[in-house]
Image (tube, helix red, strand yellow):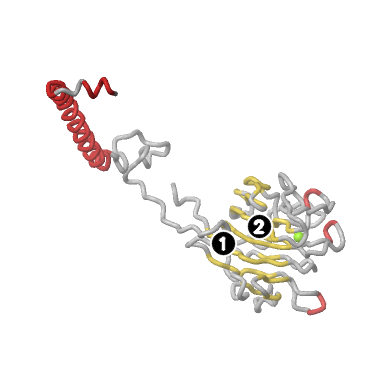
Amino acid sequence: MIFDTLLLTPINMKIRIVTALPLTVFLLTTSVLLSLSYAADGKKAAKAHATGYTDTPFLPGGKWRVHDDNRPRPKVVTAGEKAGEAPSDALVLFDGSDLSQWKKQDGSEGEWIVKDGYMEVPSKKSGKGGYLFTKKEFGDIQLHIEWRTPAEAISNSQGRGNSGILLMGQYEVQVLDSYDNKTYADGQASSLYGWKPPLVNASRKSGEWQVYDIIFEAPKFDDAGKAIKKAYVTVFHNGVLTQHRQAYLGSTGHKSVAKYKKHPAKMSFKLQDHGNPMRYRNIWVRELDFSSND
Ligand code: MG
C-alpha cells in the first residue's frame, strides 16, 4: 500500500488513467449494448412465438393439424378458489341453505332435514324420509359431493352409516361407514355396489366429513335396448382414486347380478335413504361434453 502510494507520481497517474479509460469505455459500451439487445430480444420474443401453425401435418382424422392455429380454444372456466369449491360452470345442487334442487320420487318437495349447512336423512319415525332425487336430469357429469356418517358407530356391516349415490337413479356409488367396519368388499364405501370394490379403502373415521369426486359417463342403448356403450365411473374418495373409468355391470341391485335396462339419455340421480342419519353438503355438478375438444 505504501509502495503503491509512493508510486503515485503524476506520470504514474497518467499511465493509470490512460490504461483505465479504454477499459471503462469498453465496459460501458458492452452494458449499453447488452441492455439494448435484451430490449430487442423482448420485442422479438413477443413477435417470434406463433399462436399456432397452418403448415404442420394433419392429425389422425384429418380435421386438425398438429398445433393448428384454427382449432377452437377451450372455453374458460374459473376454478373455485379453494379445492372442493364449485367452478364457474357448475350447477350447485346444495349449498347448505335449501332443497330447491331436490324432490321426492313422486315429484313433491324433498323433506330431508336442512341444518347448519348440511342436509340429513330424517328418522323413519318422522315419516319424511325417502330417496332424494335431483330435479334436473343429467347424462355425463362431474359430481362433487361431501358426506358424513354418524359420529357414533352404531351397528355393523351394511347397517352402519349406509347411503348411496345412484347415478341416473340406478348406477350406485356406495356410501357407507367403512372405517374399521367389516362388510362384503363390493358393498363398502366407494364400491360399485354388488360389482366392484374400490381399489383401496380411503375412508375417514366415523363422524368425519368425506368427499367424493365422481366422473360419470352415461350408457348408450340401441333401438333394441342393448347397451352399446356401458356406463363408466371414476371416483376419487377423499382425493384418493378408488375407481378408474370402471364400467358398470348394469343397474345396481341387491343380491343379484346387475343387468342393463334401456333408459333415457338423461335422468335424475338420487341419494339413498337407508335409515341412517347420513349427512350431505357442498354438492355441485358439471355437465360434461366429451366432444368439446374433438
Ligand atoms: Mg347404499
- Position of residue 193 in the picture relative to residue 283 (left or right): right
The numbered disc on residue 100 is: none
Q: Residues within 10 Å of mark 1 (few under 14, many from 20)?
A: many
Split into 4 quadrants, where in the image is the N terminus? top left
Q: Is any part of residue 179 visible from this angle? A: yes
Q: At 64% from the left edge and 71% from the top edge, which residue is drawn? A: 117
Image location (x, y in percent) of residue 63? 37, 42
Q: At 47% from the left edge and 50% from the top edge, which residue is drawn? A: 291
**Is ligand 1 less than 8 Å from the beta carbon at label 2?**
no
- Position of residue 260 in the picture relative to residue 38 (left or right): right
Residue flagged by tag 2: what amino acid is it? Val
Q: Which residue is mark 1?
A: 285
Q: What whole-number distance in Å separates the C-alpha atoms at marks 1 and 2?
A: 14 Å
Judging from the image, what secondary structure is the residue with disc 2 in?
strand
Q: Is any part of residue 221 visible from this angle? A: no
* Picture layout, residue 292 above or below residue 159: above
- Position of residue 293 in the picture relative to residue 97 (left or right): left
Image location (x, y in percent) of residue 181? 83, 54
The numbered disc on residue 211 is: 2
Residue 107 picture quarter: bottom right
* Quadrant hosting ligand 1: bottom right
